[in-house]
Each structure stands twice: as C-alpha cells, then as structure tokens.
C-alpha cells in the first residue's frame, strides 16, 4: 500500500524542474546522455549536502544501500561513482550557477524580512568574500601562494531576508574589489562594504546609479571638510562631516562630496570611521547599517559548518564550482521550505531534522512544525491494579 512520498522527494518538489531544464538546454547539459541526466546529478549532490556526507564514495555507498528507492527519490537508474564523478568534471558549471539564481529569487520572494532597527524600506545588501582553502597538490589549478591553494567565494547578501543574492567564485589571488564589477546595482538600495573594498572609482559608479554605499574608511584618508552636521554624542556619534577627497588620483576618481562619520562603539571600545554618499540618513543609522554587515560573516560560518563547501567530491575546477553552487541551492531551498511552510524552526534545525528523515514518509510539514504536546495520546497498556 502506498503510504506517501519519501521526505527527500517531498523536498525536491519545491524545486522548479522546468526552470532547470531551461538551464540544461542552454548549455546542452544532457547531450549524449542516456540515463544519468543533469537533474539526477543535481538531486544526488543535494542528497549528499543534506545528509552531510563527507566523500563521493560514501555518497554512492548510501545510495546503493537504498537502490530500490532510487527511482522514487529521483536519482535515476544509471547512478554510479564513475558516472557522478564524470558528470561533475565535464558538465558545465554554469547550469547550476544560473539555476542557483532562480532558486535564490524564489527564496527571496517567499522569505519574510527580519526585524531590523532601521526605518529603511529599500533593500540592504552586504558584500564580502571568504577564502576556502584547498590542498595545492590535489587542486593544482587553485594556486594561491607558493605552497597553498585556495578559492574565493564572493557573495552579495540580502541583510533583511538572510538570503545570498549573488555568488561569484574566483581564484584566491584575485583582489576582492574586482568582484564589484560583476554586480548590478539597484537604485535606492544600500550596499555595505568593509574597508578592503575601498576603490573610489567603483564607489563613484555606485553613486552614479543612484544607489547608496556605506564603507569603512582607511586610516590614511586625505580630505577637506566642507561643513559639519549636528551629532548626538550620547549614541556614539563623534562627528558627522561633509567632505571632499583631496588626493590627486582619488579626487579624480570621486570628484563629488561625500559624508564622513566617526562613531564610537561602547561594546568594543573602538572608533569606526565610515564613508557614505547618503547625506540624509541619521549618522547613528549609518553606523547600525555597518553593524548588520556581520550577518554575512554568520552566513559564511553557517555554510562552512553545516554544508559541504570545505571537503569536495571532485578535484577539477568544474567539480568544485558545481558543488559550491549546489550548496547555495540547498541553503536557499531550506529557506524556501521554512518560509512556505511557516516553520518556527531555524534553518539549522530544519536541516538537522531533514537529514535524519530523508527516507521517512512523514509529511514534511509535520516534521518541521512544533508538536502540540497537549494532544499526545499515550498508548493503553494493561496495568496492574493495586486497589
């Protein structure tokens, strides 16, 4: 008797398969493929991400142990270690990159904006990069230093919904500011950067698109003060100035006036200096905007701890990129499930619940909803009567 779908099959129903087929057709991903398609490859890799499997051999071992269920889980009939390894090495990683953008858009559509202490209706983005270390003897193409290999994961993070909006993978030797050229800026939105992204020509590009930036200034900033605004030192704002940059090249790259804010943080007992092209927002909110930038650091920490982006199931550049983009798809899928089913659990708790229930046939909505213990009925046992 059919008792329902497996939990993993229920999870994959949240993935728009037609959108994936469009990406596959664009890059001829299924050319000369008879059995193990790109869709089967995606589901197998996602299964490994959710189940927290360390290696390709262990992934195939777990799937082979449940071979009778492979069709119902969407793995297809031609799965083997050799087929999956070849697929990761040869199939175009752009298929999964573009599909990740589709799933990210869906996750942002359903995710509810988190409460932040800012009166800003427009989007707030944080842009940063993290380094993923690789063994240079195995990943020879990812040369970083003389005896070290690594890649960089550049991410544009939506602060309000905690969803990564844009992911770009480069060699670790490439400086972070170069990834700013890949962004498409939205007019009216706020973009928050660390001091490593100080490039006044690129910041002026953001200004010309009528978007706003907040960036931490470097210590050697050369400027001329035009005038100062009133500041509330009780909330930590030491000064709020409108300035122009006076460096020879810098003044040509950014010829317009810019706002300089000095803020004292009581928690760290440190001074911070920020630059922004927004001249109207209160200085305390500019400082708070930069504080929310740490959410992207928490995102990097989350995916490194709970998804497979540090140990890889292939050694080629193509295989590494495919695995990272599938990890991003998995993260966005968890966020989508949480939003659509209105689960009270966190993304981490949902991931843990699903990882232990992939072969169950319990409805997902029951798994990720908190049980009402008041209505739990205990089984009736024949107990001895003492009286």
Image (tube, rainbow, N blue to C red):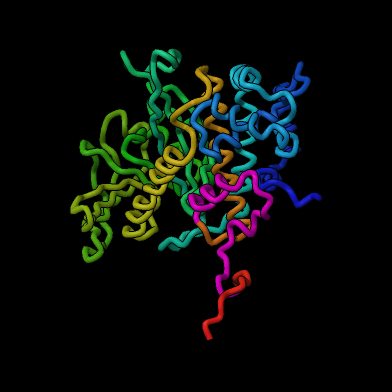
Residue 200 pos. (x, y %): 36, 35
Q: Work out whether residue 307 or residue 174 is closer to the camera in this orientation and state it.
A: 307
Q: Which residue is depicted at the point 74% across and 27% down?
A: 77
Q: Quadrant of residue 370?
A: bottom right
Residue 127 pos. (x, y %): 43, 40
Residue 321: tell me if it is visible: no
Residue 89 pos. (x, y %): 59, 18
In the rendered view, does 202 fall on the left or right side of 78? left
Residue 58 pos. (x, y %): 54, 28
Q: Is residue 18 above or below residue 353?
A: above
Q: As drawn, which residue projects farthest toward the left?
A: 269
Q: Quadrant of residue 180?
A: top left
Q: Work out whether residue 384 or residue 100 is closer to the camera in this orientation and state it.
A: 384
Q: Which residue is depicted at the point 58% across and 57% down?
A: 368
Q: Work out whether residue 229 or residue 348 is closer to the camera in this orientation and state it.
A: 348
Q: Quadrant of residue 165?
A: top right
Q: Which residue is depicted at the point 60% across and 22% down?
A: 88
Q: Is residue 308 magenta?
A: no
Bounds of the magenta segment: 346-375
């Amino acid at each position: 008797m059919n008792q329902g779908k497996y939990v993993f099959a229920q999870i994959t129903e949240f993935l728009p398969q037609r959108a994936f087929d469009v990406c596959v057709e664009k890059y001829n991903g299924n050319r000369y493929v008879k059995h193990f398609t790109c869709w089967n490859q995606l589901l197998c890799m996602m299964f490994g991400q959710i189940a927290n499997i360390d290696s390709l051999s262990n992934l195939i071992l777990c799937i082979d142990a449940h071979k009778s269920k492979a069709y119902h889980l969407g793995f297809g009939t031609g799965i083997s270690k050799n087929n999956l390894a070849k697929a990761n090495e040869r199939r175009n990683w752009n298929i999964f990159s573009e599909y990740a953008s589709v799933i990210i858009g869906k996750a942002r559509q359903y995710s509810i904006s988190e409460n932040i202490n800012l009166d800003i209706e427009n989007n707030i983005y944080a842009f940063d990069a993290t380094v993923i270390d690789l063994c240079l003897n195995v990943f020879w193409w990812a040369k970083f230093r003389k005896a070290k290999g690594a890649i960089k994961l550049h991410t544009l993070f939506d602060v309000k919904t905690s969803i990564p909006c844009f992911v770009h993978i480069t060699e670790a030797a490439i400086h972070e500011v170069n990834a700013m050229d890949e962004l498409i800026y939205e007019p009216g939105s706020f973009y928050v950067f660390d001091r490593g992204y100080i490039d006044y020509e690129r910041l002026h590009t953001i200004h010309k698109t009528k978007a706003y930036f907040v960036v931490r200034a470097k210590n050697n900033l050369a400027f001329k003060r035009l005038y100062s605004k009133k500041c509330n030192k009780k909330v930590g704002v030491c000064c709020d100035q409108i300035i122009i940059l006076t460096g020879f090249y810098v003044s040509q790259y950014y010829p317009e006036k810019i706002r300089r804010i000095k803020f004292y943080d009581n928690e760290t007992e440190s001074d911070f200096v920020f630059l922004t092209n927004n001249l109207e927002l209160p200085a305390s909110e500019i400082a708070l905007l930069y504080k929310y930038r740490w959410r992207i650091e928490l995102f990097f920490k989350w995916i490194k701890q709970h998804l497979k982006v540090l140990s890889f199931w292939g050694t080629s550049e193509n295989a590494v990129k495919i695995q990272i983009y599938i990890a991003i798809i998995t993260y966005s899928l968890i966020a989508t499930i949480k939003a659509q089913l209105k689960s009270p659990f966190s993304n981490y708790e949902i991931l843990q619940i699903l990882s232990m229930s992939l072969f169950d046939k319990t409805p997902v909505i029951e798994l990720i909803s908190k049980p009402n213990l008041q209505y739990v009925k205990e089984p009736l046992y024949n107990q001895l009567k003492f009286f």
